[in-house]
């Protein structure tokens, strides 16, 4: 699938703010299923952009804006060609015993508690009820359970809402659904990580979470690698999903994170414009 993406975020301040520092994870990831053809990033007021790879190998731009400013605008434009990671089949019938042969240091952070995902006995008991014979089959059962038992309700949670709160609320958005799936999978020692990105919403479909930056889960299946599942829509992550960053939870993979110095109550609002369009037939 050939996609064009435009993502603009604009922050407004009631009073001038300064010493703004921001990290941007907005550049689509590339692998054997995703080919990035074009990417440009623009920030106003003008800044000097630098970049690095973080611990999860995400491409991170960052900048500092010392001068006083009343607004900050960040625009990212991309063109990318995507293919479903499941075009060659699904990793079915891989037993849990295979995880014992994949005890790697790089997987450990995705099997333990993190900032917004804390393993506990209640989550473990629920996860055990959902467990199937295979790793991927279990992940699919978890995904379906979340989709059927959590209500999609925007604006009831925030970026800092913990998975334990969402367990009690049984409501939330894609970030929350993803945190719950990570929690339940990790409770069974399935490596699970958070993915931030975009979702193409075809005219004939009504995808939840496509109106803004999207989130979904990836689980690690020995012999296959990281497999994407979207609990918000109860679908496998396919060519409609554009990955930007991965991490232990939202804290590691937020598209935009930052801080500034200013008086109390300086931040007055934010506007987001997102377009994900299919190019050609």
Image (spheres, grey):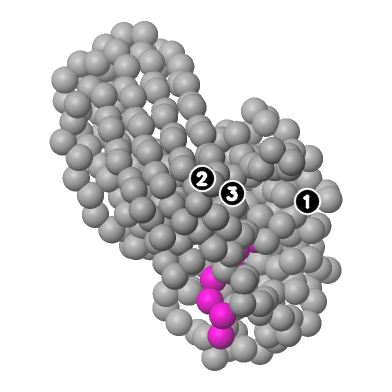
Q: Can residue 153 be seen?
A: yes
Circle 2: element type: loop
Q: Position of residue 127 (x, y in %)?
A: 75, 66
Task: Tell me the CA gap for discs 2 and 3.
Answer: 7 Å
Q: Earlier in the sequence, mark 1 or mark 3?
A: 1
Residue named by callout 1: 147
- Which residues are the magenta region? 223-229
Q: Nearer the viewer, residue 65 or 8?
A: 8
Q: Position of residue 172 (x, y in %)?
A: 69, 39
* Quadrant position of the N terminus in the picture: bottom right
Q: Is residue 101 above or below residue 189?
A: below
Direction front: furthest residue: 281
- Labelled disc at residue 279: 2
Q: State the image quarter where residue 234 is shown.
A: bottom right
Q: Position of residue 242 (x, y in %)?
A: 51, 52
Residue 91 part of the magenta-drawn span: no
Q: Earlier in the sequence, mark 2 or mark 1?
A: 1
- Labelled disc at residue 281: 3
Q: Residues within 10 Å of mark 3 (few under 14, many from 20)?
A: few
**Pair 2/1: label in front:** 2
């Amino acid at each position: 699938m050939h996609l064009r993406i435009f993502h603009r975020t604009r922050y407004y301040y009631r009073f001038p703010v300064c010493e703004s520092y921001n990290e941007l994870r907005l550049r689509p990831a590339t692998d054997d299923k995703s080919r990035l053809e074009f990417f440009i990033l623009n920030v106003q007021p003008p800044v000097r952009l630098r970049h690095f790879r973080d611990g999860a190998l995400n491409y991170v731009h960052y900048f500092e804006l010392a001068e006083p400013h009343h607004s900050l605008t960040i625009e990212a434009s991309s063109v990318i060609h995507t293919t479903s990671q499941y075009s060659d089949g699904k990793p079915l019938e891989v037993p849990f015993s295979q995880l014992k042969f994949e005890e790697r240091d790089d997987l450990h952070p995705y099997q333990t508690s993190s900032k917004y995902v804390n393993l506990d006995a209640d989550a473990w008991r629920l996860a055990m009820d959902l467990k199937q014979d295979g790793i991927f089959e279990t992940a699919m059962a978890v995904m379906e359970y979340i989709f059927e038992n959590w209500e999609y309700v925007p604006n009831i949670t925030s970026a800092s809402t913990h998975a334990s709160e969402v367990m009690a609320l049984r409501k939330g958005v894609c970030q929350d659904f993803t945190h719950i799936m990570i929690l339940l999978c990790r409770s069974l020692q399935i490596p699970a990580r958070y993915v931030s990105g975009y979702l193409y919403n075809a005219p004939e479909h009504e995808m939840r979470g496509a109106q803004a930056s999207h989130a979904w889960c990836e689980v690690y299946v020995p012999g296959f690698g990281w497999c994407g599942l979207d609990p918000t829509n109860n679908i496998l992550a396919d060519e409609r999903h554009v990955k930007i960053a991965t991490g232990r939870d939202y804290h590691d993979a937020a598209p935009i994170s930052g801080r500034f110095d200013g008086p109390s109550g300086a931040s007055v609002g934010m506007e987001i414009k997102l377009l994900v369009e299919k190019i050609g037939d």
